[in-house]
């Protein structure tokens, strides 16, 4: 081989001019390498097998394990890109609202009117005694409850609970404690309810 002065076996000079085909006596051109004693083959296949690389055949093509790994990683990257584009990895949290500059407070004057929503309580207009029933007893029970003397349930029945409440009212007003709403107790009850 011409032009391979300094090399030994395996010498390859990429900058050498390629040899031109020569003509044979019959006039047909032949390749320079036809007369060569040895043909150089790239040792990739032999080296990859020697380095522990296995070949995997997929769809009739032979791939090394490194090539198969690169293809698998590429497929995974494409898969995750599709999932990300579909929004699978979004947290579902709403985005933070945009920051707005503070505004100067505007002073407003507000006027409110307060109305008395407490229903006015009326005292009974007649004298009452235990055993009585009706609207006048309900008025007695409501007025005693509004003054802080609980007669129990406001049911229009002058029972023992109402009688005890009347007695407590009479003690507080320094009246005779008999549990009956007579003229003096009735007058004190009307005065106490109207003075609330």
Image (cartoon, helix red, strand yellow):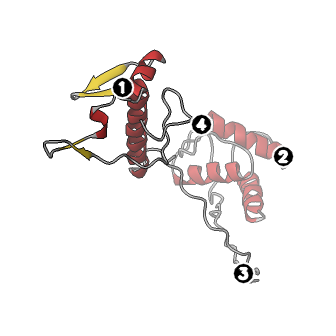
The residue labelled by disc 3 is: 111
Nearest to the eye among marks 2 and 1: give it.
Answer: 1
Left or right: 37 in relation to 144 = left
Nearest to the eye among marks 4 and 3: give it.
Answer: 3
Residue drawn at 56 percent across, 58 percent down? 95
> Which is more N-terminal, label 3 or label 4?
3
Quarter of the image with the N terminus is top left
For residue 159, the mark is 4
Nearest to the eye among marks 3 and 2: give it.
Answer: 3
Quarter of the image with the C terminus is bottom right
Kindly give the residue lying farthest to the left in the view shown.
26
Query: Could you say whether the residue bearing mark 3 is in a helix, strand or loop?
Result: loop
In space, the residues marked 4 and 3 are separated at their CA atoms by 48 Å
In space, the residues marked 4 and 1 are separated at their CA atoms by 132 Å
> Which is more N-terminal, label 1 or label 2?
1
In space, the residues marked 3 and 1 are separated at their CA atoms by 111 Å
Nearer to me, 194 or 133: 194
The crowd level at tag 3 (other Cα within 10 Å; few <14, some 14-19, many 20+) is: few
In space, the residues marked 2 and 4 are separated at their CA atoms by 20 Å
> Which is more N-terminal, label 4 or label 2?
4
Residue drawn at 26 percent across, 40 percent down? 31
Q: Are marks 3 and 1 in contact (CB under 8 Å)?
A: no
Residue 97: % across, % down: 60, 64
């Amino acid at each position: 081989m011409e032009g391979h002065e300094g090399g030994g076996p395996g010498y390859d000079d990429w900058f050498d001019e390629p040899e031109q085909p020569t003509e044979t006596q019959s006039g047909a051109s032949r390749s320079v390498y036809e007369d060569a004693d040895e043909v150089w083959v790239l040792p990739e296949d032999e080296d990859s097998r020697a380095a522990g690389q296995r070949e995997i055949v997929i769809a009739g093509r032979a791939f090394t394990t490194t090539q198969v790994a690169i293809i698998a990683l590429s497929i995974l990257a494409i898969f995750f890109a599709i999932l990300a584009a579909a929004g699978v990895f979004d947290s579902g949290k709403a985005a933070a609202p945009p920051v707005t500059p503070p505004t100067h407070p505007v002073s407003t004057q507000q006027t409110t009117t307060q109305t008395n929503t407490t229903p006015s309580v009326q005292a009974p207009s007649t004298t009452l005694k235990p055993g009585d029933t009706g609207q006048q007893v309900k008025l007695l029970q409501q007025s005693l409850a509004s003054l802080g003397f609980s007669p129990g349930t406001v049911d229009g029945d002058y029972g023992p609970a109402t009688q005890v409440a009347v007695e407590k009212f009479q003690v507080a007003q320094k009246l005779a404690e008999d549990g009956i709403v007579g003229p003096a107790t009735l007058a004190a009850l009307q005065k106490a309810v109207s003075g609330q």
